[in-house]
Amino acid sequence: MTLLSGFAVGVVCVLGMRYLAHALILRGLRAPRLPHLQTPADQGYRCTEVRLPTARGQLFAWFVPANSSGPSPAVVVIHGWGANASLMLPALHPLHSAGYAVLLVDALCHGQSDGAAFTSLPRFADDIAAGLDWLKEQPSVDAARLAIMGHSVGAGAALLCATRRPDVRAVISMSAFAHPQDIMRSFLQEARIPYLLVGWYVMRHVQRVIGARFDDIAPVKSIRQLHCPVLLVHGTEDSVVPISDLHRLMQAGAAGQVQCLCVNGGHDPSAAFEAADLQALTGFLQQAFGVVHGRELSPLRKPMSEQPA
């Protein structure tokens, strides 16, 4: 074998290994596609199934209009990784009861939305933006009063989307992590992938695939760039995203603009919709939308033992 042919074989082998690694990484990070457990109609709501166009395919969503004779404020609700819109249905009752129209979205590669080679936090943010654009075209929606509610990866995406959208009046972020690098490190550890040997390459490759550095899309950075009120909701027993991430986000956010609500429970978003917490959630939105005039927002429950340092 000549030196040139040997070099060619080496190049082919390296490229083959990179392609295999790319395929394995995408497969390992693929979100499970779960069926909807319920629909808003199953809970007695009048709703419409809609398809939202995006550059990468169509998104499935449920639109539940408000019981109002005129244009109403509206909230885009987005789930977390491996979930779907039906798992965010506990948010529907408090929001609808408070007079808001609600758009529950299946992110790309989730629920009944179209598939793709991969999805990511930035693509979740694009899906939220598609929901906001659709709402602004609806005669029954007040385009000047739009908010986002997101859970986990959807919460990080909600914060990222709001940095690009001056039309967003408020964000409710539920169980958000502070930095995606921390989540990736936990994933690698659970998969027993040694960071020094393989993990560093996986981290770098994922950032190349999604087209963004983790530092640039981290919620701890997004929250510094926001100009709308933010409510951070976190379970005191969350074993997926530790409550220390809430503290980091609170410290990064602007004083007076970011509030937090600690709830009893884990990572499941339904923990935030217990009766004791509903007034704080809807009161936050009412104040952000300017619905409540001359009245201070009810204090949010924030145990002293879990105050940010």
Image (spheres, grey):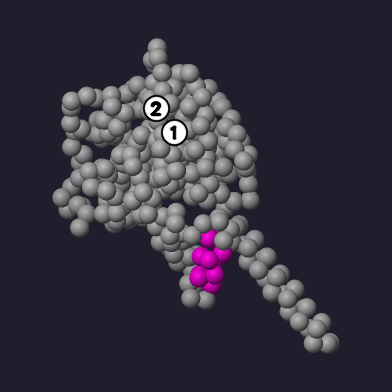
What are the residue bounds of the magenta stretch?
A: 198-207
Q: Measure the C-alpha gap from mark 2 to mark 1.
A: 14 Å
Callout in the foreground (2, 1)? 2
- In the displayed structure, 169 sits above or below 67; it is below
Q: Position of residue 10 (x, y in %)?
A: 73, 79
Callout 2 secondary element: strand
- In the displayed structure, 1 sits above or below 171; it is below
* Residue 274 visible in image: yes
**Residue 93 relative to residue 201: left or right:** left
- The quarter of the image holding the N terminus is bottom right
Which residue occupies the extreme bottom position in the image?
2
Label 2 crowd (10 A; few <14 / some 14-19 / many >=20): some
* Residue 152 visible in image: no
- The quarter of the image holding the C terminus is bottom left
Which residue occupies the extreme right position in the image?
1
Q: Position of residue 197 (x, y in %)?
A: 52, 76
**Residue 194 relative to residue 266: left or right:** right
Residue drawn at x 32%, y 23% is 98
**Residue 25 relative to residue 285: left or right:** right
Determine which residue is flagged by label 1. Answer: 76
Q: Disc number at residue 144?
A: 2
Residue drawn at x 38%, y 50% is 222
Q: Is residue 203 rendered magenta in the image?
A: yes
